[in-house]
Image: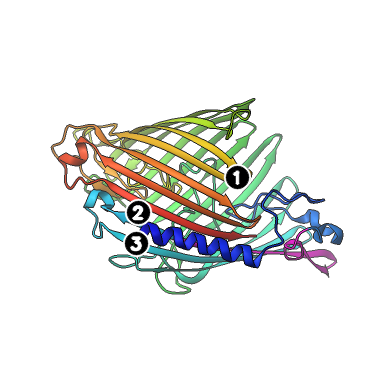
Amino acid sequence: MPSLRCLAWLAATAAAAAALLPHVALAAPKEAWEAPTLTITRYDEDWSDLESAEKRDHHWTGPFKYIPLGQIGGNDAWLSTGVELRARNENYENNLWASAEAPNDSYVWLRALPYADLHVGKLRAFAQPILATSVSVAPSPGPIDGTGVDLLQGFVEADLGPVALRAGRQMLSLGTERLVGTRYGPNVPLAFDGLRANLTVGAANVSLLAMRPVQPAKGSFNDRTSSQKALWGAYAAMPEVDLYYLGYRNDAARWLGREGGETRHTLGARWHAKRGDWHWNVEGAYQFGHFADGKISAWTLGTEFGRAFPDLPLSPDLTLRANVVSGDHGSANNRIGTFNALFPKGKYFGELSPVGPYNIMNLHPAIGLQLAPTVSAGVAAAAYWRQSLEDGIYDIPGNLIRAAGNSRARFIGKEVEATFAWQATAELELSLSVSAFAPGAFIRETGSARTIRMIGCESNFRF
């Protein structure tokens, strides 16, 4: 049984961690220095506080995070290193409601992401290779399942005071990754090649971008810059408010059975804050431009409101999300109304996300629980509808997976998901998810319509 294999794997990983790292306490370490929050992109971590050898001695990772190199060209030089080792098992039954080429699948993703971050005065060089492979992906693994050995990130940066200029390959994470994300959930994350300028203007941090996505390929040292897609724009992050413009071009776009060149301009704003036990995140965006010989007019609105109850048992945190993403309303006026999510995060609506943020409306209540200081759990439900009855539904990358056909049904389906995470050590996290997506009237009227079931388990060691 896939579920038993998943649990056995997590148990074995936990036992190995306990044997290899018995000296690491399960609770948050009480140290003389507070380590930066480990990030997905890694280059945002600042370990310069460990210049003091005394502080480095407070945790076993200290000597790896700050390695003094003396003087280079008259400037102080130091190196920071780290690694992520992730193994993820996913088990599907009736994938895409049994319409996928391999409706039942059980596979393992394996990846290693070491990195080195060199600082010499105001200059910096960051390099992160990737070693990614898979086992038992049916019918056959693709580039996102395994890219062999390649360069995931590699850039140089010059700190010019209020402006930092960066050139090379890097992952991008803007806001909550509705439009530009790292694609961290799948085995091979998304990177971009190009130029980035980070400016500090008063309380605002502004990123100016001119990028092309990296196209992974099966085999080593053959990931290449896309010749068809481009991303540019400006993203301003201020206290509680983000404002952005993103430009996008795809020379080989495909929408509603048509192919052609696509140029989109996205204007968006995000309001996010926390007041006492309340927290919220509201984001809206409008898109315009052209596709083939038609105009583009599309929009989205996403909301999230939540309240924490820290004084109650298990410290529950209740959240309600609601999203509306525009779809196309027919080709009579030659206007494209389907919103393009560009480069969104990989697990958009949860661990099981068969539908992506295109032509969709959904409600998504969830509750998070703190079972112990290092153990958390969550339960979420979701319901999905089509925003436009003239448009179909898409996966997260934007591929059409069910055309509208003759169906006038709006309801896509409902989903329930439970997650469990244990921070076994300061470096090792073990997680488990169980999900089911029951089809609604639209799925039943347009093809196979069995309930999707998924079990995922993951071990992630990162320092």
Inter-mark Cα distance, 2 to 3 = 35 Å
Q: Residues within 10 Å of mark 2 (few under 14, many from 20)?
A: some
Marks 3/1: CA distance? Answer: 40 Å
Q: Which residue is mark 1?
A: 207
Mark 2 = which residue? 251
Is 354 on the left-hand or right-hand side of 13?
A: left
Image coordinates of residue 62 in percent, x first then y, are 76, 61
Q: Is residue 53 left or right of residue 360?
A: right
Name the front one of labels 3 and 1.
Answer: 3
Q: Nearer the viewer, residue 207 or 405?
A: 405
Q: Identify which residue, 438 or 12, lies in the foreground.
A: 12
Q: Residue at left 35%, top 51%?
A: 454
Predominant SS along the magenta part:
strand
Q: Quadrant of residue 417?
A: top left
Q: Nearer the viewer, residue 141 or 358?
A: 141
Above or below: residue 231 compared with residue 74 = above
Amino acid type indicated by mark 1: Ser
